[in-house]
Image (cartoon, helix red, strand yellow):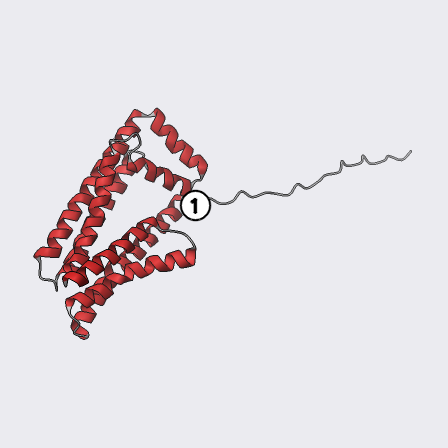
Amino acid sequence: MSVQPNPQPATTTEPQVTAPATPTGNSANANLRRYLATQLLIDVIAPAAVFYVLLNAFNLSALPASLISSAIPAIRTVVHVVTKRTVDVLGLVMLTLFVVGGAVSVIEGNPRILYAKDGWLTGLFGAWILVSLLMRRPFMLAAGRAIATVKIGDEGAAQWEARWEQEPRFRRDIRFVSLIVGAVLIADAVVRVIIAYALPIGTVPLATNVQYVVMLGCLLTWFFWYTNKHGLRA
């Protein structure tokens, strides 16, 4: 008598589906550092360097040197719109201020207006953040929701909204951060305008850029420390 081997059940191989990778915290922080470094180079270091090269090496007067150097961030905005096919709202605001400030500077013959306009921008932004505290949803809630959407997706934005609705401490912390950021930006605006009109014009670009870097560095250091300590990182 022969023994027949038991037939083995047929097996099928299911295709393995790999979920798309989501950015890790380290990669998100690296992207943020690269973004800030790029902004610092284009909006702060390059304009100041061009100003002093034009002023000292090419013997241009302060007004044309200021106009040319201040055009660098404006050119970046135009290139972004053309290449990315997206509108950078903040960049467009800065571009508008550059055009208006440049026109007024030429009419008045006063390059200081170009540097004072940076104070107007940060001052208006800071005032808007403070006004948002009187509304149902302050600025930092909207900013955190946008960051959560970029880093995690709609689920992250929904979690951010749920915390706002359910956690009183979360609401207090968000409002406190909005208060500090708005107040610092208004103080920065006042200092920028004072620098623009009080110092010799040859020292204004360097002084206002050093002041900006110090202010931004201190604000971001406090911001990241506080938001990490209180669980406010999107």
Point out the image quarter for the C terminus: top left
In x, y percent, where is residue 167?
A: 33, 25
**Image position, residue 120 (x, y; %):** 19, 49
Residue at (31% x, 49% y) in the render:
90
Residue at 18% x, 44% y: name it: 186
- At a point 35% along the width and 51% down the height, the residue shown is 88
Compare residues 78 and 9 and report the one nearer the observer: 78
Q: Is residue 171 above or below residue 217?
A: above
Q: Residue at x 17, y 48 (%)?
A: 189
Depth check: 220 or 47 in front?
47
**Above or below for 166 versus 116:** above
Any part of residue 181 in sight: no
| Closer-to-camera residue (200/170) | 200
The amino acid beneath tag 1 is Pro
Identify the residue at the far bottom of this view. Answer: 58
Secondary structure of residue under mark 1? loop
Image location (x, y in percent) of residue 218: 20, 46
Marker count (numbered) = 1
- Quadrant for the N terminus in the image: top right
Above or below, 166 against 93 in this view is above
Determine the image quadrant of residue 148: top left
Say if residue 112 shows up in the picture.
yes
Q: Is residue 201 left or right of residue 150?
A: left
Give the image location of residue 145, x and y in percent: 37, 37
Residue indicated by mark 1: 23
Quarter of the image holding residue 155?
A: top left
Q: Which of these two is toward me, 125 or 148? A: 125
